[in-house]
Amino acid sequence: MSKLLEGKRGIITGALDQNSIAWKVAEKAHEHGATFVLTNAPIAMRMGEINELAAKTNSKIIPADATSTEELQKLFTEAQEILGGKIDFVLHSIGMSVNIRKNIPYQDLNYDFFQKGIDVSALSLHKMLSVAKNMDAINEWGSVVALTYAAAQRTYPFYTDMADIKAMLESIARSFGYHYGLEKKVRINTVSQSPTKTTAGSGIKGFGDFYDYADAIAPLGNASAEDCANYCISLFSDLTRMVTMQNLFHDGGYSTTGVSDVIMKKFGI
Ligand SMILES: NC(=O)c1ccc[n+]([C@@H]2O[C@H](COP(=O)([O-])OP(=O)(O)OC[C@H]3O[C@@H](n4cnc5c(N)ncnc54)[C@H](O)[C@@H]3O)[C@@H](O)[C@H]2O)c1
C-alpha cells in the first residue's frame, strides 16, 4: 500500500471511542504514515478510551474544549512543538446538540441549548481556523476537513437544530475556505457522511430505523466510518490539492437517489 500521508503532521479532534469516525481516521492516518496529535474536550478524556488510540497510533493527546479560543491556541502551539513543525491536516469531528439529547422537538427548541450547539458544532470550526491562520500554523496546501450531514440541505424532522447548525458549518467551510485559500493556499472542505452508528449518531431519536432507511435508499448502501476515514485520508493527501470549499457527499449515492426499488417493494409496488 502506498502511504499517502508520509511526512505529514495533523490534528485529529473527536475520537471518543472505537465507534467514532475520528477514531477510524486516526487509525488510517497512522497506517498512511502521518504523525498527529489527538484532541478532545477535557470531559471526554475522563472516559479514558482515547489513551488506547494514542498508544496504538504513537500519538500524544492534548485536551482542548473546541469552544475556547485560548485552549485552541494552546492546542496549535503544543501540536507544532510535539510534531516538530507546521500542521498539514486537521479533522474537525465535533458535534453535540443538547436539544437532540433532551429530545426537544424543532418547533420548541430551547435557545440556550441551541446557542450551545452552534458554539460546539459550528463556531468551533471558525475558531479553529481563525486561531490557526493568526498563528500561521498550517502549511501551504494543508487540508482541513469537517464532518457534516445531509440535513443541511434537506429536512429531517428528528435532526432538529443540528440541521441548521450543519448548514452553518458548511457555510463557514466555504467562506473561510475562500480567505484561507487566497492567502495561504489552505483548503477546507466538509464531508457529508451517511448515518453511522456512533455515540453522536445513536443519540438521535429513531436513529436505528433511519439508518436502515438510508441503507435501503443508497445504491451502494450506507458508507461505514472506515470508508469515511479513507475518504478523509484522500482529502488530506496531495492527490486532492485543488479541492476546496466543497461539501462532498460520502453516502453511497443516497443524496442523489429519489427512491429505490427496495423502498418501492415495501409499499407493495
Ligand atoms: N454518526 C453519524 O450518523 C454522523 C453522520 C454524519 C456526520 N456526523 C458527524 O461526524 C462528527 C463526529 O461524530 P461521530 O458520529 O463520530 O460521534 P462521536 O460522538 O464519536 O464524536 C463526537 C465528538 O465531539 C466531541 N466534542 C463534543 N463537544 C466538544 C467540545 N466542546 N470540544 C471538543 N470536542 C467536543 C465529543 O467528545 C466526541 O468525541 C460530528 O460532527 C457528527 O455530526 C455523524
Image (tube, rainbow, N blue to C red):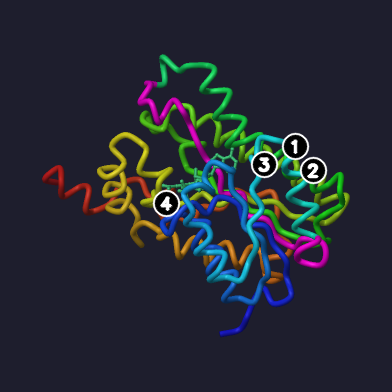
Precedes in sequence: disc 1 or disc 4: 1
Precedes in sequence: disc 3 or disc 2: 3
Precedes in sequence: disc 1 or disc 3: 1
Precedes in sequence: disc 4 or disc 2: 2
Q: Is mark 4 within 8 Å of ligand 1?
A: yes
In front: label 3 or label 2: 2
Residue under numbered circle 2: 131
Above or below 128: residue 123: above
Q: Is mark 1 within 8 Å of ligand 1?
A: no
The part of the image, by quadrant, that contains residue 201 is top left
Precedes in sequence: disc 4 or disc 3: 3
Q: Residue at x 69, y 43 (%)?
A: 174
- Label 3 residue SS: helix
Report the amino acid beneath label 3: Leu
**x, y percent for residue 162:** 49, 32
Work out whether residue 29 or residue 50 is closer to the camera in this orientation and state it.
Answer: 50
**x, y percent for residue 86:** 82, 61
In front: label 4 or label 3: 3
Residue under numbered circle 4: 194
Work out whether residue 50 or residue 209 is closer to the camera in this orientation and state it.
Answer: 50
Distance, label 4 to label 2, CA atoms, is 30 Å
Question: For mark 2, does the 10 Å Cα neighbourhood hold few (<14), some (14 to 19), or many (20 or more) residues?
Answer: many
Q: Is residue 97 left or right of residue 257?
A: right
Residue under numbered circle 3: 125
Q: Is residue 85 left or right of residue 26?
A: right
Point out which mark residue 69 bears. 1
Q: Residue at x 35, y 55 (%)?
A: 218
**x, y percent for residue 206:** 28, 37
Q: Is residue 139 left or right of residue 233?
A: right
Please say if the residues under marks 3 and 2 sit with CB atoms less than 8 Å apart.
no
Based on the picture, tell me whether residue 89 belongs to the magenta stretch: yes
Precedes in sequence: disc 1 or disc 2: 1
